[in-house]
Image (tube, rainbow, N blue to C red):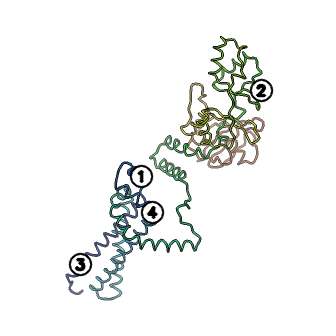
Amino acid sequence: MPNIDPAIFLPIGTIVFLLFLSAFFSGSETALTATSKARMHKLESDGNLNARRVNLLIKNRERLIGAILLGNNLVNILASVIAASVFNQLFGASLIATGLATATMTVLVLVFAEVTPKTAAITRPDTVAMLVAPVMRWVVYILAPVTWLVQMFVRGVFHIFGLDISKDSAVFSAEEELRGAIDLHHYEGRVDKESRDLIRGALDLNEIRTEEIMIHRKSIEMLDIDMAKDALIRQALKSAHTRLPLYRENPDNIIGILHAKDLLRALWDAEGNADAINFEALAREPYFAPETTTLQEQLDAFKVKQEHFALIVDEYGALMGLVTLEDILEEIVGEIEDEYDSPVQGVRPQGDGSLTVDGDVTLRDLNRAMDWNLPDEEAVTVAGLVIHEAQSIPDVGQTFSFYGFRFKILRRRRNQITALKITPIT
């Protein structure tokens, strides 16, 4: 080995400096791409200047990544060229010198300019992003003309192959991103089940139709206006509900909604004389809504009309069921029980780990109660899911296994499955 010229320490120092710049670019890339836009927005709203700089940088991620990659490649290539010159000076121009330069720079770049800064940045992306933002904004500004040319070239190549990389071509909506984020945080244990269900329930209002949560017409408590008035009053006061549909001749012919408060006021005015009450005049006008209305649309309609109660009809005007404001709110906050609610909601855990479930329990309620993921795209109720999968109406005692659960038919009334036993398959 020849004597070392002291002047060689200048290029070595330059290589160290370039590796530092490479580490800066690598860490900046990781931090700025991994940082939380929501958190940066909140910090900017609180007056954090560096958070505002981060938001300006990530607003155009394509330009940001282009500038970082351009700067990173420039310093890495320059460092490699200088390293080759140093090794040629030390060992002479030979393949050995080239090989040593290549191996040395590969290790240095990999360890100190890639893995180390990226690992540090990914552990605290928000902090690192705000730290590097003041410098990166000038880097992006200085390299803007070159990165613009690169962007145009890249877009042209993508266009040739028919690929759309515009901002409007996002695969997932904002709602889907929020669902994914909250599910991930719940899976990682950072968000509890109640909070996850609350957020997911609010996001799902635009995805659920009223027919999926309505009380079916066979379960609606209604009053025949042609009954004897004292019997009608007695039945109304015995009911656990404050609003009861009134019908004439058949349950499809709804003529009004009787409110318990209106009935009590009328009884007071009539000094308890039932025969003096005109129930048809007392009844409020019924509010009908189509079965295809989403919960968000129905909630908005309730607010506009100042109603709490809607009768759901199909496209032919036939009564399908009813939905209340409480039903919609329960899709967000979970079951709201009052002193008249039954403690049994159709789901009864058994000692062996199985569940006895009423057939009309909705899949959404079961999934929410048990933290399961049974599909509800093709059916609304548990019984409907079994019938859909079996492609028939099962007999009592039949057992089916799908989606990681075993379903046993316990009771059936005519063509309706009324009770099932569900056992998770482990």
Does any portion of residue 381 appear in the rendered image? Answer: no
Looking at the image, which residue is at 75% across and 48% down? Answer: 391
Give me the C-alpha separation between circle 4 and circle 2.
65 Å
Does any portion of residue 85 appear in the rendered image? Answer: yes
Q: Secondary structure at mark 2?
A: loop
Give me the C-alpha separation between circle 3 and circle 2.
100 Å
Give residue 257's position: percent from left, percent from top: 68, 27
Q: Residue 60: which disc?
A: 4
Q: Quadrant of residue 5?
A: bottom left
Q: Amino acid at mark 1?
A: His
Instruction: Please tell me which of labels 3 and 2 falls first in the chain.
Output: 3
Give residue 204's position: percent from left, percent from top: 58, 45
Q: Residue 248: which disc?
A: 2
> Label 2 near label 4: C-beta < 8 Å?
no
Give residue 415's position: percent from left, percent from top: 77, 39
- The answer to which of 185 and 356 lies nearer the viewer is 185
Q: Amino acid at mark 3?
A: Leu
Q: Amino acid at mark 2?
A: Arg
Give me the C-alpha separation between circle 1 and circle 4.
15 Å
> Label 2 near label 3: C-beta < 8 Å?
no
Q: Nearer the viewer, mark 3 or mark 2?
A: 2
